[in-house]
Amino acid sequence: MNKFLEHFKTVTRHRNAVIKNCFKAGIPLQGLKHDLSKYSPEEFLNGVKFFQGTRSPHEAEREKYGFSYAWMHHKGRNKHHFEYWCDYDPETRKMSPVKMPVKYVKEMFCDRVAASKIYMKEKYNDASPLEYFMRAKKTRTIHSETSAILEYLLKMLRDRGEEYTFAYIRRLKKY
């Protein structure tokens, strides 16, 4: 029961932090709809089973099975994840990243900042989301323009802070 409550609290704290960020970013409706699938049985029950409190339960589930059932469910339903935006390229006949609409890039930024704060707690600073993003940059399958705009926003957060960056994001209409 303790893992159930702790996972519920973590998911809800994270979701509330994203909602707050989305309001600051000028996308309140996206914030209110953010990550509702995390409360579905497919995601929530595996989250409880693999909950540790210091990292995403998806990582522990991957260690056991080689992939995460919950993540597969989650990324297929939430357009703010770049992994959602992959499709078969008719020319190469291979899976390729697709450029994300800017409204989902905004939500992805809000999500990454909130996740860094939730998992890092007092160790968080405005450079933390960028550092996390850069660690896997070379192995990430993301459209180059989507990656560039997210990295630009994360660098802006690091260098100019939240207030400036969210004001910029509110004015951001397209690439």
Image: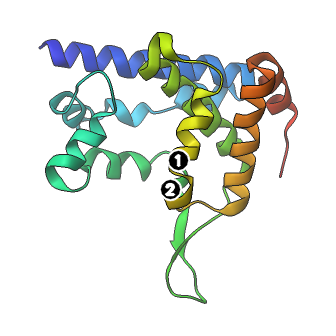
Q: Quadrant of residue 55?
A: top left
Give the camera-side residue of 24 and 63.
Answer: 63
Side of 41 relative to 135 (left or right): left
Q: Residues within 10 Å of mark 2 (few under 14, many from 20)?
A: some
Can I make out residue 26 in this image?
A: no
The label on residue 84 is 2
Task: Give the secondary structure at mark 1.
Answer: loop
**Proximity of marks 2 and 1: CB atoms separated by less than 8 Å:** yes
Quadrant the N terminus occupies? top left
Would residue 104 be found to the left or right of residue 132 on screen? right
Residue 147 seen: yes
Percent position of residue 100, x then y = 66, 55
Q: Position of residue 67 (x, y in %)?
A: 25, 54
- Residue nearest the viewer, comparing 16 with 166: 166
The residue drawn where x is 49% and y is 27% is 115
Q: Is residue 165 above or below residue 136?
A: above
Q: Residue at the location (56% across, 33% down)?
A: 112
Place residue 74 in its image quadrant: top left
Please, what is the three-letter code of the amino acid marked with disc 1? Answer: His
Whole-number angstrom distance, CA of label 2 to CA of label 1: 6 Å
Q: Residue at x 45, y 20 (%)?
A: 120
Q: Amino acid at mark 2?
A: Tyr
Q: Toward the viewer: 175 or 155?
A: 155
For the residue labelled by badge 2, is the local secondary structure a helix, a strand or a loop?
helix
Instruction: Say which residue appears at 33% left-offset and 52% top-offset.
Output: 72
Q: Position of residue 7 (x, y in %)?
A: 27, 20
Image disc number at residue 81:
1
Q: How crowded is the residue under tag 1: few (<14 C-alpha within 10 Å), some, or many (20+)?
A: some
Indicate the quadrant where residue 111 lies.
top right
Image vertical order of residue 38 relative to residue 120, above or below: below
